Image (cartoon, helix red, strand yellow):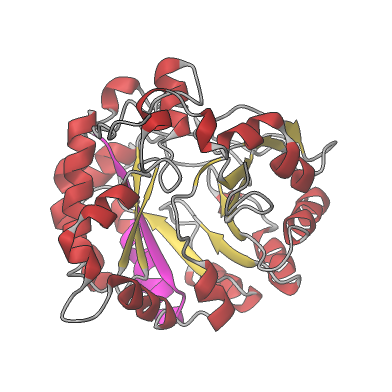
Amino acid sequence: MTGAFAQSPFIVIWETTRACALRCVHCRAAAIPHRDPHELTTEEAAALMERIAAFGDPAPLVVLTGGDPLRRPDMVELVAHGTRIGLTVSLTPSGTAAVTQEKLRALRDAGLARLAVSLDGATAGAHDGFRRVRGSHGYTLSIIERARDLGLPLQINSTVCRQTVGELPALAEQVAGFGVTLWALFFLIAVGRAQAEQALAAADIEHVLEWAADLRARVPFGIKTTEAPQYHRVLAQHSSEMALAGCPQEARDGRRERESGLPGSAHRRMRAERAVTDGNGFVFVDHVGNICPSGFLLMPAGNVRRDDLVAVYRDDPLFVALRDPSRLGGRCGRCEWRARCGGSRARAYALTGDPLGEDPGCVHHPASRE
């Protein structure tokens, strides 16, 4: 079965390194203090970017993450290379002193399209307690201020779990004052250092999604979710999704992207019409080149050092299955929203061992299907 992302992912995430100065309780990468000597070299990273561009026009968005990507000395060079070959490149640095004004200026001048920083608490105590390094909150606020001074489009990422969910209303108020383009809510999956007991129950996930859908109609930035694709169902069901003072929500979101300062072709690619899920619009390359459906669904289907990224994404049996809603099991397989949502494949795998199984984080009971 073919779909919107059968030939090309919407986004490619490259885990540039697992080195990081933070010790976050939920870290997907289980980051380490020092760089792995087996990381992709600068030359291999440039070749990876060229294969991403080979997916065709429009090319997938590229996010350079970690660990902390700024622990690699070649980041400015790689951003410049990606931009030069037509990619839209974003970066997610850790909240540390390494993100200086000079470094951000160099990244901006190299063509960086967006800077995404993590903010998981509205106070220093809450954020630093989650990141497990005192001072991270202050550094993060400094990064936001410096990026705004330099005119870099900003995204705020926040992890949603038992420890952070109470911070969301206060965080929303702060995000509104930062002048950001997008607030991305990452729903915790039990991978890396994250534990299943940290994750929200399905009813609590639904409550947060309903809250976010209501908030979305009232704020000057977009809201997206990672590993909670049922947000698309909630939005479609939400009465305030359809109009706000006679202005459709989709038009409002388009205006936000245009006001971000991105060129027209770039801002059109910064949104997807359906959920972007593990292996379905999403592909992840880890620090040593393994190709996985996402950073939360670490089931390697190849390695960029020996396999072609484009061919793996398009033809590998795991990726093909993840894009076929008829292969889904349980409630996800019977769900009327399966082509638009599809459920979190990473959560299904983490909690049931089956990447095509029912998403335990969803409360929706499908209508009867013959």
Q: State the residue in front, 188 or 54.
A: 54
Magenta span includes 151: yes
Rendered location of residue 293, percent (x, y): 59, 37
**Quadrant of the image containing the C terminus:** top left
Query: Which residue is the extreme one toward the top?
Result: 353
Residue 314 located left or right of residue 200:
right
Rendered location of residue 40, percent (x, y): 75, 43
Q: Is residue 32 above or below residue 77?
A: above
**Quadrant of the image containing the N terminus:** top right
Q: State the residue in front, 190 or 211.
A: 211
Q: State the residue in front, 220 or 41.
A: 220
> How many numbered discs?
0
Question: Residue 312 sits in which quadrant?
Answer: top right
Q: Is residue 217 above or below residue 323?
A: below
Residue 241 located left or right of residue 339:
left
Residue 145 visible at all: yes
Query: Which residue is the extreme one toward the front?
Result: 370
Rendered location of residue 39, percent (x, y): 72, 39
Q: Residue at x 67, y 64 (%)?
A: 59
Residue 273 located left or right of residue 121:
right
Segment tinted magenta in the rendering: 139-161
Q: Residue at x 25, y 64 (%)?
A: 175
Rendered location of residue 157, percent (x, y): 37, 53
Residue 38 visible at all: no
Magenta span includes 349: no
Residue 1 located left or right of residue 241:
right
Q: Residue at x 71, y 72 (%)?
A: 86
Q: Residue at x 39, y 22 (%)?
A: 330
